Image (cartoon, rainbow, N blue to C red):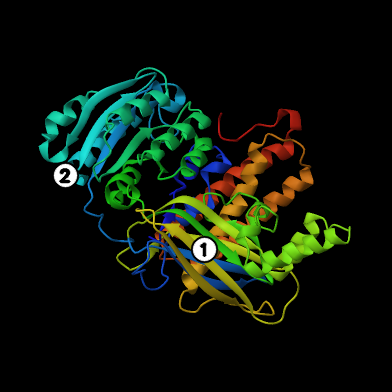
Protein backbone atom coordinates (compact mmCIF):
# COMPACT_ATOMS: atom_id res chain seq x y z
CA UNK A 1 0.00 0.00 0.00
CA UNK A 2 1.09 3.50 -0.54
CA UNK A 3 1.76 5.29 2.70
CA UNK A 4 -1.60 6.38 4.06
CA UNK A 5 -2.63 9.04 6.50
CA UNK A 6 -3.86 8.41 10.01
CA UNK A 7 -7.48 8.64 8.98
CA UNK A 8 -10.13 6.26 7.70
CA UNK A 9 -8.66 2.98 6.52
CA UNK A 10 -11.94 1.61 5.18
CA UNK A 11 -15.66 2.27 4.69
CA UNK A 12 -17.07 -0.99 6.06
CA UNK A 13 -19.68 0.76 8.17
CA UNK A 14 -21.33 2.23 5.07
CA UNK A 15 -22.17 -1.13 3.52
CA UNK A 16 -23.11 -2.72 6.82
CA UNK A 17 -25.69 -0.05 7.64
CA UNK A 18 -27.46 -0.59 4.31
CA UNK A 19 -27.84 -4.32 4.89
CA UNK A 20 -30.98 -3.72 6.94
CA UNK A 21 -32.39 -0.75 5.12
CA UNK A 22 -30.74 2.33 6.62
CA UNK A 23 -29.23 5.19 4.68
CA UNK A 24 -25.95 5.63 6.63
CA UNK A 25 -24.40 8.72 8.16
CA UNK A 26 -22.26 10.75 5.76
CA UNK A 27 -19.18 10.15 7.91
CA UNK A 28 -19.27 6.37 7.26
CA UNK A 29 -18.29 6.95 3.61
CA UNK A 30 -15.15 9.03 3.03
CA UNK A 31 -12.96 9.45 -0.02
CA UNK A 32 -9.94 8.37 2.01
CA UNK A 33 -11.68 5.26 3.33
CA UNK A 34 -12.77 4.13 -0.14
CA UNK A 35 -9.40 4.92 -1.76
CA UNK A 36 -7.63 2.90 0.94
CA UNK A 37 -9.72 -0.20 0.23
CA UNK A 38 -8.44 -0.46 -3.35
CA UNK A 39 -5.16 -1.30 -5.07
CA UNK A 40 -3.37 0.67 -7.78
CA UNK A 41 -0.59 -0.25 -10.19
CA UNK A 42 1.58 2.87 -10.27
CA UNK A 43 5.12 1.82 -11.05
CA UNK A 44 8.18 1.07 -8.95
CA UNK A 45 8.22 0.95 -5.18
CA UNK A 46 9.85 3.78 -3.22
CA UNK A 47 13.44 2.82 -2.32
CA UNK A 48 14.75 5.74 -0.26
CA UNK A 49 12.27 8.01 1.52
CA UNK A 50 9.88 7.42 4.39
CA UNK A 51 7.34 9.48 2.43
CA UNK A 52 7.48 10.30 -1.29
CA UNK A 53 4.99 11.41 -3.93
CA UNK A 54 4.37 10.17 -7.46
CA UNK A 55 2.02 12.50 -9.32
CA UNK A 56 0.07 12.17 -12.57
CA UNK A 57 -1.78 14.89 -14.53
CA UNK A 58 -5.28 13.96 -15.72
CA UNK A 59 -7.69 15.77 -18.01
CA UNK A 60 -11.01 13.93 -18.26
CA UNK A 61 -14.40 15.17 -19.51
CA UNK A 62 -13.06 18.71 -19.62
CA UNK A 63 -11.88 18.70 -16.00
CA UNK A 64 -8.27 18.88 -14.83
CA UNK A 65 -7.08 16.61 -12.02
CA UNK A 66 -3.82 15.80 -10.29
CA UNK A 67 -3.48 12.30 -8.83
CA UNK A 68 -0.88 12.12 -6.07
CA UNK A 69 0.17 8.70 -4.77
CA UNK A 70 1.98 8.64 -1.44
CA UNK A 71 4.62 5.96 -1.18
CA UNK A 72 7.03 4.85 1.54
CA UNK A 73 10.24 2.88 1.65
CA UNK A 74 8.50 0.86 4.38
CA UNK A 75 5.66 -0.28 2.10
CA UNK A 76 5.52 -4.07 2.01
CA UNK A 77 8.49 -4.43 4.38
CA UNK A 78 8.53 -6.40 7.64
CA UNK A 79 8.37 -4.28 10.79
CA UNK A 80 11.66 -3.14 12.30
CA UNK A 81 13.52 -4.97 15.05
CA UNK A 82 12.21 -2.55 17.69
CA UNK A 83 9.69 -4.46 19.85
CA UNK A 84 6.25 -3.20 20.84
CA UNK A 85 4.48 -2.91 24.19
CA UNK A 86 0.80 -3.38 23.32
CA UNK A 87 -1.92 -2.56 25.83
CA UNK A 88 -5.21 -4.06 24.62
CA UNK A 89 -8.31 -2.44 26.13
CA UNK A 90 -11.61 -4.28 25.61
CA UNK A 91 -15.03 -2.65 25.91
CA UNK A 92 -17.28 -4.90 28.05
CA UNK A 93 -20.27 -2.54 28.26
CA UNK A 94 -23.74 -3.88 27.57
CA UNK A 95 -23.75 -2.85 23.93
CA UNK A 96 -20.86 -5.25 23.24
CA UNK A 97 -23.36 -8.12 23.63
CA UNK A 98 -24.77 -7.12 20.26
CA UNK A 99 -23.81 -8.82 17.03
CA UNK A 100 -21.22 -7.35 14.70
CA UNK A 101 -23.71 -6.83 11.87
CA UNK A 102 -26.87 -4.76 12.10
CA UNK A 103 -30.11 -6.68 11.73
CA UNK A 104 -29.13 -9.40 14.21
CA UNK A 105 -30.97 -10.39 17.39
CA UNK A 106 -29.47 -7.37 19.09
CA UNK A 107 -31.10 -5.03 16.61
CA UNK A 108 -34.44 -6.36 17.74
CA UNK A 109 -33.67 -5.70 21.38
CA UNK A 110 -32.46 -9.20 22.36
CA UNK A 111 -28.92 -10.23 23.15
CA UNK A 112 -27.05 -12.22 20.57
CA UNK A 113 -26.46 -15.88 21.36
CA UNK A 114 -22.97 -17.19 22.03
CA UNK A 115 -23.00 -19.10 18.76
CA UNK A 116 -23.91 -16.02 16.72
CA UNK A 117 -20.71 -14.32 17.83
CA UNK A 118 -21.29 -11.05 19.67
CA UNK A 119 -18.86 -8.14 19.61
CA UNK A 120 -17.14 -9.14 22.84
CA UNK A 121 -16.52 -12.63 21.51
CA UNK A 122 -14.92 -11.15 18.42
CA UNK A 123 -12.72 -8.96 20.64
CA UNK A 124 -11.65 -12.00 22.66
CA UNK A 125 -10.82 -13.81 19.44
CA UNK A 126 -8.71 -10.83 18.36
CA UNK A 127 -6.61 -11.07 21.54
CA UNK A 128 -6.10 -14.79 20.85
CA UNK A 129 -4.80 -13.96 17.37
CA UNK A 130 -2.38 -11.38 18.74
CA UNK A 131 -1.00 -13.77 21.34
CA UNK A 132 -0.85 -16.89 19.18
CA UNK A 133 -0.06 -15.54 15.70
CA UNK A 134 1.23 -12.00 15.70
CA UNK A 135 3.50 -10.92 18.55
CA UNK A 136 7.24 -11.65 18.70
CA UNK A 137 9.03 -13.07 21.73
CA UNK A 138 10.49 -9.69 22.68
CA UNK A 139 7.11 -7.93 22.36
CA UNK A 140 4.93 -7.44 25.43
CA UNK A 141 1.15 -7.42 25.83
CA UNK A 142 -1.27 -6.31 28.54
CA UNK A 143 -5.05 -6.75 28.61
CA UNK A 144 -7.63 -4.66 30.45
CA UNK A 145 -11.34 -3.95 30.13
CA UNK A 146 -13.63 -1.01 30.70
CA UNK A 147 -17.29 -0.21 31.18
CA UNK A 148 -18.02 2.50 33.76
CA UNK A 149 -14.54 1.83 35.20
CA UNK A 150 -11.29 0.16 34.13
CA UNK A 151 -10.33 -3.40 35.12
CA UNK A 152 -7.00 -5.23 34.96
CA UNK A 153 -7.15 -8.60 33.20
CA UNK A 154 -3.46 -9.33 32.53
CA UNK A 155 -0.44 -7.11 33.35
CA UNK A 156 2.18 -6.21 30.76
CA UNK A 157 3.94 -9.50 30.05
CA UNK A 158 6.83 -10.36 27.75
CA UNK A 159 5.47 -12.61 25.01
CA UNK A 160 8.37 -15.05 25.30
CA UNK A 161 7.35 -15.72 28.92
CA UNK A 162 3.66 -16.33 28.19
CA UNK A 163 1.84 -19.62 28.55
CA UNK A 164 -0.84 -18.90 25.97
CA UNK A 165 -3.68 -20.88 27.55
CA UNK A 166 -3.06 -19.53 31.05
CA UNK A 167 -2.73 -15.97 29.76
CA UNK A 168 -5.94 -16.20 27.75
CA UNK A 169 -8.05 -17.95 30.41
CA UNK A 170 -9.30 -14.74 32.15
CA UNK A 171 -9.75 -13.08 28.75
CA UNK A 172 -12.05 -15.85 27.57
CA UNK A 173 -14.10 -15.52 30.77
CA UNK A 174 -15.08 -11.90 30.09
CA UNK A 175 -18.78 -10.98 30.06
CA UNK A 176 -20.72 -7.84 29.10
CA UNK A 177 -22.13 -5.51 31.74
CA UNK A 178 -22.37 -1.84 32.63
CA UNK A 179 -22.07 1.41 30.75
CA UNK A 180 -19.27 2.97 28.69
CA UNK A 181 -16.68 5.37 30.09
CA UNK A 182 -13.73 5.64 27.73
CA UNK A 183 -11.61 7.69 30.14
CA UNK A 184 -11.57 4.76 32.58
CA UNK A 185 -10.34 2.40 29.86
CA UNK A 186 -7.70 4.84 28.64
CA UNK A 187 -6.41 5.39 32.19
CA UNK A 188 -6.07 1.67 32.91
CA UNK A 189 -4.61 0.87 29.51
CA UNK A 190 -1.99 3.61 29.92
CA UNK A 191 -1.06 2.60 33.46
CA UNK A 192 -0.30 -0.94 32.31
CA UNK A 193 2.45 0.38 30.02
CA UNK A 194 4.29 1.83 33.03
CA UNK A 195 5.90 5.21 33.60
CA UNK A 196 9.47 4.34 32.58
CA UNK A 197 9.59 5.01 28.83
CA UNK A 198 13.37 5.23 28.53
CA UNK A 199 13.82 1.91 26.70
CA UNK A 200 13.57 2.07 22.90
CA UNK A 201 10.25 0.33 22.26
CA UNK A 202 7.07 1.06 20.35
CA UNK A 203 4.11 1.66 22.66
CA UNK A 204 0.47 1.53 21.66
CA UNK A 205 -2.97 1.29 23.27
CA UNK A 206 -5.39 -0.78 21.18
CA UNK A 207 -9.10 -0.28 21.86
CA UNK A 208 -11.60 -2.94 20.80
CA UNK A 209 -14.95 -1.18 21.17
CA UNK A 210 -18.22 -0.36 19.45
CA UNK A 211 -17.52 3.32 20.21
CA UNK A 212 -20.89 3.91 21.80
CA UNK A 213 -21.47 6.83 24.16
CA UNK A 214 -18.17 8.70 24.02
CA UNK A 215 -17.37 12.38 24.10
CA UNK A 216 -15.28 13.55 21.13
CA UNK A 217 -13.55 16.29 23.10
CA UNK A 218 -12.59 13.96 25.93
CA UNK A 219 -11.39 11.33 23.47
CA UNK A 220 -9.19 13.83 21.61
CA UNK A 221 -7.65 15.14 24.83
CA UNK A 222 -6.82 11.65 26.09
CA UNK A 223 -5.24 10.58 22.81
CA UNK A 224 -3.20 13.79 22.63
CA UNK A 225 -1.92 13.41 26.19
CA UNK A 226 -0.68 9.91 25.48
CA UNK A 227 0.83 10.89 22.12
CA UNK A 228 2.93 13.52 23.89
CA UNK A 229 4.54 10.62 25.79
CA UNK A 230 5.08 8.59 22.62
CA UNK A 231 2.17 6.27 23.43
CA UNK A 232 -0.15 6.03 20.44
CA UNK A 233 -3.74 4.87 20.12
CA UNK A 234 -5.51 2.59 17.64
CA UNK A 235 -9.27 2.04 17.74
CA UNK A 236 -11.04 -0.85 16.07
CA UNK A 237 -14.71 0.15 15.88
CA UNK A 238 -16.67 -3.09 16.05
CA UNK A 239 -20.05 -3.42 14.42
CA UNK A 240 -22.19 -1.25 12.17
CA UNK A 241 -23.40 0.95 15.01
CA UNK A 242 -20.08 2.51 15.96
CA UNK A 243 -20.08 6.24 16.65
CA UNK A 244 -18.86 7.50 13.28
CA UNK A 245 -18.86 11.12 14.42
CA UNK A 246 -15.80 10.39 16.58
CA UNK A 247 -13.61 8.98 13.83
CA UNK A 248 -12.36 12.40 12.73
CA UNK A 249 -11.24 13.11 16.28
CA UNK A 250 -9.18 9.93 16.31
CA UNK A 251 -7.54 10.47 12.93
CA UNK A 252 -6.37 14.01 13.64
CA UNK A 253 -4.15 13.02 16.56
CA UNK A 254 -0.50 12.06 16.21
CA UNK A 255 0.18 8.35 15.83
CA UNK A 256 -3.49 7.36 16.02
CA UNK A 257 -5.68 5.53 13.54
CA UNK A 258 -9.05 3.82 13.44
CA UNK A 259 -10.67 0.95 11.63
CA UNK A 260 -14.19 -0.39 11.28
CA UNK A 261 -14.80 -4.14 11.39
CA UNK A 262 -18.13 -5.88 10.97
CA UNK A 263 -16.90 -9.49 10.67
CA UNK A 264 -13.98 -11.80 11.42
CA UNK A 265 -12.31 -11.31 8.05
CA UNK A 266 -12.10 -7.55 8.52
CA UNK A 267 -10.79 -7.99 12.06
CA UNK A 268 -8.07 -10.36 10.87
CA UNK A 269 -7.04 -8.09 8.04
CA UNK A 270 -6.59 -5.23 10.47
CA UNK A 271 -4.93 -7.02 13.39
CA UNK A 272 -3.17 -10.00 11.80
CA UNK A 273 -2.49 -9.51 8.09
CA UNK A 274 -1.62 -5.81 8.39
CA UNK A 275 -0.42 -5.60 11.99
CA UNK A 276 3.14 -4.81 10.91
CA UNK A 277 1.88 -1.74 9.07
CA UNK A 278 -1.13 -0.53 11.04
CA UNK A 279 0.70 -0.29 14.36
CA UNK A 280 4.03 1.23 13.26
CA UNK A 281 4.11 4.78 11.83
CA UNK A 282 6.41 5.57 8.92
CA UNK A 283 6.64 9.35 9.41
CA UNK A 284 5.17 12.31 11.24
CA UNK A 285 4.14 15.93 10.57
CA UNK A 286 3.56 15.37 6.86
CA UNK A 287 2.60 18.33 4.70
CA UNK A 288 1.79 17.89 1.01
CA UNK A 289 1.37 21.18 -0.85
CA UNK A 290 0.94 22.29 -4.46
CA UNK A 291 1.85 25.54 -6.15
CA UNK A 292 0.96 26.79 -9.63
CA UNK A 293 0.89 30.24 -11.19
CA UNK A 294 -2.00 29.49 -13.52
CA UNK A 295 -4.00 26.78 -11.74
CA UNK A 296 -5.72 26.69 -8.38
CA UNK A 297 -7.12 23.83 -6.32
CA UNK A 298 -10.90 23.43 -6.55
CA UNK A 299 -11.22 20.26 -4.45
CA UNK A 300 -9.17 17.75 -2.45
CA UNK A 301 -10.21 14.10 -2.02
CA UNK A 302 -8.48 11.34 -0.06
CA UNK A 303 -7.14 12.95 3.13
CA UNK A 304 -8.44 13.07 6.73
CA UNK A 305 -9.38 16.69 5.93
CA UNK A 306 -10.90 16.18 2.50
CA UNK A 307 -14.25 17.63 3.50
CA UNK A 308 -12.59 20.90 4.49
CA UNK A 309 -13.27 23.93 2.30
CA UNK A 310 -10.45 24.49 -0.17
CA UNK A 311 -10.34 28.19 0.71
CA UNK A 312 -9.12 27.15 4.17
CA UNK A 313 -6.21 25.21 2.65
CA UNK A 314 -4.77 28.02 0.53
CA UNK A 315 -1.93 30.02 2.05
CA UNK A 316 -2.23 33.64 0.95
CA UNK A 317 -0.02 36.57 1.87
CA UNK A 318 -0.66 38.30 5.16
CA UNK A 319 1.80 39.97 7.53
CA UNK A 320 1.66 36.76 9.59
CA UNK A 321 2.47 34.47 6.63
CA UNK A 322 5.13 36.78 5.17
CA UNK A 323 7.95 34.60 6.49
CA UNK A 324 6.86 31.69 4.29
CA UNK A 325 7.43 33.67 1.08
CA UNK A 326 10.63 34.09 -0.91
CA UNK A 327 12.93 36.94 0.06
CA UNK A 328 12.12 38.91 -3.10
CA UNK A 329 8.39 38.74 -2.26
CA UNK A 330 9.06 39.76 1.34
CA UNK A 331 11.08 42.75 0.10
CA UNK A 332 8.31 43.72 -2.33
CA UNK A 333 5.72 43.63 0.47
CA UNK A 334 7.95 45.74 2.70
CA UNK A 335 8.61 48.33 -0.03
CA UNK A 336 4.90 48.60 -0.90
CA UNK A 337 3.98 49.16 2.72
CA UNK A 338 6.77 51.65 3.47
CA UNK A 339 6.30 53.67 0.29
CA UNK A 340 2.52 53.90 0.63
CA UNK A 341 2.93 55.08 4.22
CA UNK A 342 5.59 57.60 3.18
CA UNK A 343 3.15 59.32 0.82
CA UNK A 344 0.38 59.11 3.41
CA UNK A 345 -1.74 56.79 1.28
CA UNK A 346 -1.26 53.51 3.11
CA UNK A 347 -2.30 50.49 1.10
CA UNK A 348 -4.73 48.07 2.77
CA UNK A 349 -3.18 44.74 3.76
CA UNK A 350 -5.50 42.95 1.34
CA UNK A 351 -4.22 44.98 -1.62
CA UNK A 352 -0.59 44.23 -0.72
CA UNK A 353 -1.53 40.55 -0.41
CA UNK A 354 -3.10 40.47 -3.87
CA UNK A 355 0.06 41.99 -5.39
CA UNK A 356 2.39 39.53 -3.63
CA UNK A 357 0.22 36.54 -4.51
CA UNK A 358 0.32 37.68 -8.14
CA UNK A 359 4.15 37.81 -8.01
CA UNK A 360 4.43 34.47 -6.18
CA UNK A 361 1.74 31.86 -6.68
CA UNK A 362 -0.16 30.92 -3.51
CA UNK A 363 0.62 27.52 -1.99
CA UNK A 364 -2.25 25.15 -1.22
CA UNK A 365 -1.51 22.74 1.60
CA UNK A 366 -3.65 19.82 0.47
CA UNK A 367 -3.01 17.66 3.50
CA UNK A 368 -1.42 18.24 6.87
CA UNK A 369 -1.43 14.97 8.79
CA UNK A 370 0.26 13.96 11.99
CA UNK A 371 1.15 10.44 10.94
CA UNK A 372 1.66 8.27 7.88
CA UNK A 373 1.45 4.47 8.03
CA UNK A 374 2.87 2.06 5.45
CA UNK A 375 1.11 -1.13 4.47
CA UNK A 376 1.44 -4.28 2.47
CA UNK A 377 2.17 -4.59 -1.25
CA UNK A 378 -0.05 -7.01 -3.14
CA UNK A 379 1.49 -10.06 -4.84
CA UNK A 380 0.88 -8.29 -8.16
CA UNK A 381 3.06 -5.37 -7.05
CA UNK A 382 0.04 -3.06 -6.71
CA UNK A 383 -0.17 -0.48 -3.92
CA UNK A 384 -3.16 -0.56 -1.58
CA UNK A 385 -4.40 2.97 -0.99
CA UNK A 386 -2.21 6.05 -0.73
CA UNK A 387 -4.19 8.08 -3.30
CA UNK A 388 -5.01 11.78 -3.06
CA UNK A 389 -7.00 13.38 -5.91
CA UNK A 390 -7.03 17.12 -6.56
CA UNK A 391 -9.42 18.89 -8.86
CA UNK A 392 -7.83 21.92 -10.52
CA UNK A 393 -9.24 24.96 -12.24
CA UNK A 394 -7.61 27.69 -14.30
CA UNK A 395 -7.23 31.16 -12.83
CA UNK A 396 -7.39 32.42 -16.39
CA UNK A 397 -7.65 30.66 -19.79
CA UNK A 398 -4.30 29.30 -20.98
CA UNK A 399 -3.40 27.47 -24.16
CA UNK A 400 0.12 26.56 -23.09
CA UNK A 401 1.22 23.80 -20.74
CA UNK A 402 0.89 24.70 -17.08
CA UNK A 403 3.50 23.66 -14.49
CA UNK A 404 2.50 22.48 -11.03
CA UNK A 405 4.94 21.92 -8.19
CA UNK A 406 4.18 19.22 -5.62
CA UNK A 407 6.12 19.45 -2.37
CA UNK A 408 6.11 17.08 0.60
CA UNK A 409 7.79 17.72 3.93
CA UNK A 410 7.89 15.31 6.87
CA UNK A 411 9.84 14.14 9.91
CA UNK A 412 11.06 10.61 10.47
CA UNK A 413 10.84 8.74 13.75
CA UNK A 414 13.93 10.51 15.12
CA UNK A 415 12.53 13.97 14.36
CA UNK A 416 14.82 14.68 11.39
CA UNK A 417 13.11 16.81 8.71
CA UNK A 418 13.00 15.90 5.00
CA UNK A 419 11.67 17.51 1.83
CA UNK A 420 10.86 16.33 -1.70
CA UNK A 421 9.84 18.49 -4.65
CA UNK A 422 8.17 17.07 -7.77
CA UNK A 423 7.41 19.09 -10.91
CA UNK A 424 4.37 18.11 -12.98
CA UNK A 425 3.18 19.61 -16.28
CA UNK A 426 -0.53 19.90 -16.98
CA UNK A 427 -1.41 19.91 -20.71
CA UNK A 428 -2.78 23.09 -22.23
CA UNK A 429 -6.07 23.67 -24.07
CA UNK A 430 -7.86 21.14 -21.81
CA UNK A 431 -6.83 18.31 -24.12
CA UNK A 432 -7.58 14.81 -22.80
CA UNK A 433 -4.69 13.40 -20.77
CA UNK A 434 -4.30 10.02 -19.07
CA UNK A 435 -0.93 8.33 -18.66
CA UNK A 436 -1.12 5.23 -20.90
CA UNK A 437 0.99 3.13 -18.52
CA UNK A 438 -1.14 3.85 -15.45
CA UNK A 439 -4.51 4.58 -17.03
CA UNK A 440 -6.32 1.81 -15.16
CA UNK A 441 -5.20 3.08 -11.75
CA UNK A 442 -6.05 6.69 -12.58
CA UNK A 443 -9.45 5.81 -14.06
CA UNK A 444 -10.26 3.76 -10.96
CA UNK A 445 -9.45 6.72 -8.74
CA UNK A 446 -11.75 9.03 -10.72
CA UNK A 447 -14.59 6.49 -10.69
CA UNK A 448 -14.33 6.03 -6.93
CA UNK A 449 -14.32 9.80 -6.37
CA UNK A 450 -17.51 10.15 -8.39
CA UNK A 451 -19.13 7.29 -6.48
CA UNK A 452 -18.36 8.75 -3.06
CA UNK A 453 -19.38 12.25 -4.09
CA UNK A 454 -22.75 11.12 -5.44
CA UNK A 455 -23.57 9.04 -2.36
CA UNK A 456 -22.38 11.68 0.13
CA UNK A 457 -24.51 14.34 -1.55
CA UNK A 458 -27.60 12.18 -1.20
CA UNK A 459 -26.80 11.18 2.39
CA UNK A 460 -26.34 14.83 3.34
CA UNK A 461 -29.77 15.65 1.97
CA UNK A 462 -31.38 12.63 3.66
CA UNK A 463 -29.80 12.86 7.10
CA UNK A 464 -29.95 16.58 7.75
CA UNK A 465 -33.64 16.27 8.59
CA UNK A 466 -34.54 19.21 6.35
CA UNK A 467 -37.85 19.31 4.49
CA UNK A 468 -36.97 22.48 2.59
CA UNK A 469 -36.04 20.82 -0.65
CA UNK A 470 -38.78 21.04 -3.22
CA UNK A 471 -40.14 17.96 -4.91
CA UNK A 472 -38.46 19.10 -8.12
CA UNK A 473 -35.09 19.29 -6.35
CA UNK A 474 -35.48 15.79 -4.91
CA UNK A 475 -36.45 14.46 -8.33
CA UNK A 476 -33.35 16.05 -9.85
CA UNK A 477 -31.09 14.51 -7.20
CA UNK A 478 -32.71 11.11 -7.66
CA UNK A 479 -32.33 11.27 -11.45
CA UNK A 480 -28.69 12.35 -11.18
CA UNK A 481 -27.92 9.51 -8.75
CA UNK A 482 -29.52 6.91 -11.00
CA UNK A 483 -27.64 8.18 -14.04
CA UNK A 484 -24.36 8.29 -12.12
CA UNK A 485 -24.80 4.68 -11.02
CA UNK A 486 -25.59 3.48 -14.54
CA UNK A 487 -22.46 5.17 -15.89
CA UNK A 488 -20.36 3.76 -13.06
CA UNK A 489 -21.71 0.25 -13.60
CA UNK A 490 -20.98 0.43 -17.33
CA UNK A 491 -17.41 1.63 -16.77
CA UNK A 492 -16.67 -1.11 -14.24
CA UNK A 493 -18.13 -3.76 -16.56
CA UNK A 494 -15.84 -2.54 -19.34
CA UNK A 495 -12.59 -1.90 -17.48
CA UNK A 496 -12.72 -3.68 -14.09
CA UNK A 497 -14.82 -6.80 -14.56
CA UNK A 498 -12.08 -8.95 -12.91
CA UNK A 499 -11.60 -6.54 -9.99
CA UNK A 500 -13.48 -8.02 -7.02
CA UNK A 501 -13.31 -4.83 -4.94
CA UNK A 502 -14.77 -2.75 -7.78
CA UNK A 503 -17.54 -5.32 -8.21
CA UNK A 504 -18.23 -4.95 -4.50
CA UNK A 505 -18.54 -1.19 -4.97
CA UNK A 506 -21.06 -1.75 -7.77
CA UNK A 507 -23.15 -3.86 -5.38
CA UNK A 508 -22.96 -1.23 -2.62
CA UNK A 509 -23.78 1.53 -5.10
CA UNK A 510 -26.77 -0.42 -6.37
CA UNK A 511 -27.98 -1.03 -2.80
CA UNK A 512 -27.66 2.66 -2.04
CA UNK A 513 -29.60 3.70 -5.15
CA UNK A 514 -32.34 1.20 -4.27
CA UNK A 515 -32.57 2.55 -0.72
CA UNK A 516 -32.61 6.15 -1.85
CA UNK A 517 -35.20 5.34 -4.53
CA UNK A 518 -37.42 3.67 -1.94
CA UNK A 519 -37.38 6.75 0.22
CA UNK A 520 -37.92 9.01 -2.80
CA UNK A 521 -40.93 7.00 -3.97
CA UNK A 522 -42.52 7.12 -0.52
CA UNK A 523 -41.76 10.82 -0.04
CA UNK A 524 -43.20 11.56 -3.48
CA UNK A 525 -46.58 10.26 -2.30
CA UNK A 526 -46.50 11.43 1.33
CA UNK A 527 -47.09 14.89 2.82
CA UNK A 528 -43.84 16.36 4.13
CA UNK A 529 -45.00 16.29 7.77
CA UNK A 530 -45.58 12.52 7.56
CA UNK A 531 -42.43 11.51 5.68
CA UNK A 532 -40.40 8.68 7.12
CA UNK A 533 -36.78 9.31 8.02
CA UNK A 534 -34.51 6.57 6.66
CA UNK A 535 -31.29 8.00 8.03
CA UNK A 536 -28.88 6.22 10.34
CA UNK A 537 -30.66 5.77 13.71
CA UNK A 538 -29.52 8.12 16.46
Judge whether 164 appears above or below 361 on screen: above
The Cα–Cα distance between marks 1 and 2, rounded to whole angstroms, is: 41 Å
In the image, which is nearer the foreground, mark 1 or mark 2? 2
| Residue ID for mark 2 | 138
Query: Which quadrant does the N terminus fall into?
Result: bottom left
Picture coordinates of residue 459, whole percent (x, y): 62, 43
Judge whether 67 appears above or below 207 on screen: below
- Check the image and name the residue furthest to the bottom: 400
Q: Which mark is residue 9?
A: none
Residue drawn at 36 percent across, 68 percent down: 46
Side of 404 where 264 appears, left or right: left
* Other residues around mark 1 within 10 Å, as few (<14) / some (14–19) / many (≥20): many
Picture coordinates of residue 141, whole percent (x, y): 22, 36
The mark nearer the N terminus, 1 or 2, is 2
Judge whether 295 appears above or below 276 on screen: below
Residue drawn at 50 percent across, 70 percent down: 421
Picture coordinates of residue 187, whole percent (x, y): 36, 26
Q: Dot 2 lies on which element? A: loop
Residue drawn at 72 percent across, 35 percent down: 466
Residue drawn at 38 percent across, 56 percent down: 412
Of 503 and 293, the residue lying toward us? 293
Of 313 and 434, the residue lying toward us? 313
Query: Which quadrant does the C terminus fall into?
Result: top right
Q: Dot 1 lies on which element? A: helix
Of 54 and 25, the residue lying toward us? 54
| Residue 117 in view here | no
Side of 395 where 200 appears, left or right: left
| Residue 474 in view here | yes
Side of 439 where 178 appears, left or right: left
Side of 468 where 217 appears, left or right: left
Of 508 and 460, the residue lying toward us? 460
| Residue ID for mark 1 | 445
Amino acid sequence: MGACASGAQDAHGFASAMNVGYIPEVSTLTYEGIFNEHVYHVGELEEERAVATQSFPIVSDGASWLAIFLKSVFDGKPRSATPIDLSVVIDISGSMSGCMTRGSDFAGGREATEDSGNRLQHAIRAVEWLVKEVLRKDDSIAVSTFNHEGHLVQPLTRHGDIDCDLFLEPVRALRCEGGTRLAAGMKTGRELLGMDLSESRNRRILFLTDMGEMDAGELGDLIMQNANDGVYVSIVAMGAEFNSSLTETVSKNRGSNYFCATNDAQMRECLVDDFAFNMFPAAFDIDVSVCSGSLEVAGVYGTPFDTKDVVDLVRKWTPQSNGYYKSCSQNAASHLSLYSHSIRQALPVGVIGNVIDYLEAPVTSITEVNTMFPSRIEDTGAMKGGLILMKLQERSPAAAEQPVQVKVTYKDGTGQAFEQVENVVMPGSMQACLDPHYGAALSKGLLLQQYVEACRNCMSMTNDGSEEESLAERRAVHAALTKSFQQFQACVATSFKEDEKMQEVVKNYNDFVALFSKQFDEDDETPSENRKHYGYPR
